[in-house]
Structures are given as C-alpha cells and as structure tokens.
Amino acid sequence: AIPVDQAIWTAMEFATVDYKKKWVLAEQLIAKIYKKVPVYMVLADGLHAVDMLKSLIDQGIRFEMRLHANRVVKDGDFKGQVKKHPKLKLNGKRPMRTIKAEWYGMNIHITAFRRVTKYGRVIITYQVSNYKSSVRQHVRAYEFRWNIEKFFRTAKQRLGLNDCQSRKKTLQENHLLNVFFAYAFLQYERKKNRLKNVESAIKSIKGSSFEDVRSQFARSAEIFGVA
C-alpha cells in the first residue's frame, strides 16, 4: 500500500468561494490518478455522495464502499432502510449475504457482513458496489481498505503527519507528500527484507549506518521518482 496524492479540505467558513465538498476533492483525485494509472477499484468509507457514485458508474470504475444502515433502497415490493431488508437478515450460521437493489436510480449490489470486533461485540456492516461478484469477494475487496487505516496510524504516530506548524498551504502540502514518500520508502524496505510490517522497517533502518540509509534512499528515488 503506497500513498500517491492528497488534497487539502478547507471548511466552508474559511474557504468561502473556493469551498469544495470532500467527495468533490476525492473525485478530482481519482480523475487525476486515473490519467496515469488504471484504477481497478475505488474503496471508501461511508462519507461518499450519490453524485460521486454515479460518476464512477459512468466511467466504468468499480467501487466498494460502506453503506449506512439507514439508507433507503428499493427491491421489488420492498422499499425501506437497508437494515430492515428481509433478504439481508443474517440468521443462523450465514455471516454474509449480497443482494441487488436500487438506490437513487442506480442498480447496485448491497452486501451485509456480520463480524465480531476485537472487544467481542457482534456487529453487522453494509457495503455498496456496482459490480457482480460472489459475496465473499465483495467482503474481501473491502477488507483491503484496512491498509489505509494502517497508513494513517503509522503516519500519525511515527512519521509526524500532524506535526507541520506552517500556515502556508504549499508547505503543508510539501510536508504531507514527504510523509507519503517516507511511507512508500518504508513499504519498499519492508517488502525487500520480508519484514512483518512498516514498524519493523523503521526499527531496521534505525539500526543501519548513515551510508546504508543514504544508498537506500538513492535506490528508492529510482523507483518512486524525485521526491
């Protein structure tokens, strides 16, 4: 998992005429990346917008996103909240199920998945997608999003993502992109040395000499480009 780009969101009271919603920024980032790298699938949490999903459908880009349980969908004679759909009731030993329904005029696939949290609590989550697949593949695809959460955890706790004090947008963006590069570099080291995680790569680099680290950065520059 390698972070490649970012966009800074500014609240409406500060942005005034230049204000953009988060989903608009996300859509612009996807379009920007898509020009250079084929996008196979977009994974996102529940902060998406209907317009963004329609845009992805029009572009033929697959998506797998979290769907709030209170969203109203239509399926045959049923029209109501996702959590009340009789076909999505997970009874017995069946932990997951996928159905096809209509939401804001879009034909979508909804997956319900029952899981146990690390605290032992049983919860049911819902996903929305625009492609046909097995229920297990839908669940597995969304699980890849966990890599994003791991990036934010490491970037905040170990790489100083929140530590830039500058008020200039350019410097803020440079700080973010340098954190991105550091994480990509660590992922490369983790993969090359077959380490368990990025934290192990950080520990390994701390034990290396200055010359070794400098040569490692030189090699990574050839892979990731000038940063």
Image (cartoon, rainbow, N blue to C red):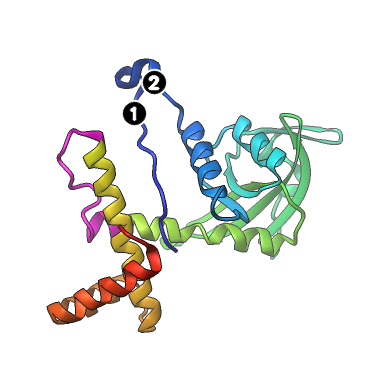
Q: What residue lies at 55% left-to-right and 55% top-to-bottom?
A: 37
Q: Which mark is residue 10?
A: 1
Question: Looking at the picture, does residue 133 appear above or below residue 22?
Answer: below
Which comes sooner in the sequence, label 2 or label 1? 1
Q: Which residue is mark 2?
A: 18
User: Nearest the camera: 163 or 133?
Assistant: 163
- Residue span colored magenta: 154-169
Left or right? Give the position of 200 relative to 134: left
Tell which residue pokes out farthest to the bottom in this image. Answer: 193
Q: What residue lies at 60% left-to-right and 35% top-to-bottom?
A: 52
Q: What residue lies at 45% left-to-right and 62% top-to-bottom?
A: 120
Quadrant (top left/top right/bottom left/bottom right) for the C terminus: bottom left
Quadrant (top left/top right/bottom left/bottom right) for the N terminus: bottom left
Element type at marker 1?
Answer: loop
User: Nearest the camera: 217 or 126?
Assistant: 217
- Residue 105 position by quadrant: top right
Q: Are marks 2 and 1 in contact (CB under 8 Å)?
A: yes
For residue 168: magenta?
yes
Tell which residue pokes out farthest to the right in this image. Answer: 76
